[in-house]
Amino acid sequence: MHAPVLVLKDSLKRESGTKVHHANIQASKAVADIIRTTLGPRSMLKMLLDAAGGIVVTNDGNAILRELDLAHPAAKSMIELSRTQDEEVGDGTTSVIVLAGEMLHVAEAFIDKNYHPTVICRAYNKALEDAIAALDKIAMPIDVKDRSTMLGLVRSCIGTKFTSQFGDLIADLAIDATQTVGVDLGQGLREVDIKKYIKVEKVPGGQLEDSKVLKGVMINKDVVVPGKMKRKIVNPRIILLDCPLEYKKGENQTNAELVREEDWEVLLKMEEEYIENLCMQILKFKPDLVITEKGLSDLACHYLSKAGVSAIRRVRKTDNNRIAKASGAVIVNRPDELQESDVGTGAGLLEVKKIGDEFFAFIVDCKDPKACTVLLRGASKDLLNEVERNLQDAMSVARNIIKNPKLVPGGGATELTVSATLKQKSSSVEGIEKWPYEAAAIAFEAIPRTLAQNCGVNVIRTMTALQGKHANGENAWIGIDGNTGAIADMKERKIWDAYNVKEQTFKTAIEAACMLLRIDDIVSGIKKKQAPGASQASSKPKVETEADADGEQILPD
């Protein structure tokens, strides 16, 4: 017998084969279990304490997982899933994780039977194609202009969220905001940029019912000289600048030696004239409001207020862009290049109001605003953060519909239909792949099952009844009413999901499950080279604990 050959360093820890598959599946299931209870209208909230001691109270799958700090590599990749989902379509973050967890769970049985992971993956991918095809079959197009349909849709999307108790409020806000900033690209395409042109301003105080979408923009600034400048202007002419209205200082400490005393006065005079010049160039256009992203010197203030012009300084670049979009002004970099066309006349009213203890400048009643601000009011900061998250989701859904106006039934009906279709098709799949294919079909039932669980109804009865209804792929619209747990027709209850949210959910979940199943080796250990003097002993125990902390409890050797 030959002596064993050491290939890997002592400090490295290697796990391979089925052990890894099991560890990965357990880890993914653990992640799925964390957020399983946050699916559906009867969902629970999670309270997370972050390192700084702040609290996050939410049931948005992505927001929860973002805060978690995990040790297991497979679990980390699950978290990436919900992030992708959030960035792509903004909704369905919880469903993705639950579905992926379930896909892996049903794969476990096959790995025990020594199926090769690639066989399982192949079957899953086939199932994914058929699932998308089944989705296409049951999707129905809608009219984006029809407000009530849109409302029902956005409502069912945020019905699972905390704010559903405020009725249509958030849904209204989301639809108003997204319809405002939609830009037609031609060919019937609409581009809605939520991030750039919809600003959500959270102001604690007041009631949630006071929240509204402004037909324009608001910024957290007051005019520069509150006493002198007008705080309310009707139909203001707005000029937006991107340059400081003050004398240019030298780059570094500049020393100027002056021989005669009068030179000093000349110097000061030059500075004053320079600023006066700038202001005169601006005042040529008779603006009522000058907004700059940079500083505004006292002297410039004086000239402007003398001419009866209000000024706001040091506005954020993003805010400035929004004002430009809303009022039709063009942001100018040098005052001497101003043209009449750069002056924004689209706004109907400028008003500075005090809300809470801060001043806000409102530029509202715009003619055809392409940017807007959503003003959220509410009792506490935590509440506002949660409302904002829900609003983000709602706006994403509204955006998705505007981009791709197709609907599928909600309440688990889609998943059940897909599941039934796949079950039928599985009999025509030949060879060994048939079984994993069928398992994938069963895995889709995780979503309606979880919905039923969260309602607290008898899960087995409900699921059997639903499967019976869906047996031959008919009654595609029968699902669970998440509030009561009763079996109902989703068309009547107006419980919908956006087509591309569902599609993305299925794709992400199955592809992720395949990726995790394909891992058969985890090598973990210390990467850093140790200083030659440091003793090996001290580093040894560290590796054991660090490498796979949760793997240890899962796999009793």
Image (cartoon, rainbow, N blue to C red):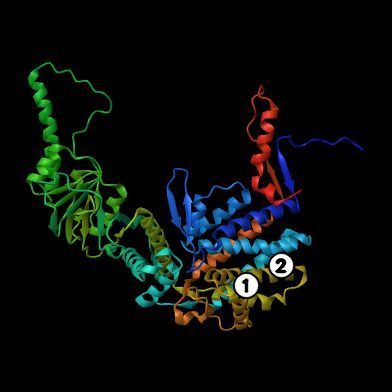
- Name of the residue lying farthest toward the top: 259
Q: Is residue 146 visible?
A: no
- Quarter occupied by residue 154: bottom left
SS at mark 2 in the image: helix
Taking 387 as reference, is 15 left or right? right
Q: Is residue 341 visible?
A: yes
Near-viewer residue (479 or 308): 479
Residue found 18% across the figure and 36% down from its top: 246
- Quarter occupied by residue 252: top left
Q: CA distance from mark 1 to mark 2?
A: 14 Å
Residue 209 image point, x, y percent: 29, 65
Q: Amino acid at mark 1?
A: Asp
Residue 332 image point, x, y percent: 24, 48
Give the residue pinned by disc 2: 436
Give the residue pinned by disc 1: 130
Q: Quadrant of the N terminus?
A: top right
Of circles 1 and 2, the one toward us is 2
Residue found 65% across the figure and 65% down from its top: 125
Taking 70 as reference, is 6 left or right? right
SS at mark 1 in the image: helix
Q: Which mark is residue 512?
A: none
Taking 113 as reference, is 100 left or right? left
Residue found 69% across the figure and 33% down from its top: 540
Q: Amino acid at mark 2?
A: Pro
Query: Compared to 243, does 219 lie above or below?
Result: below
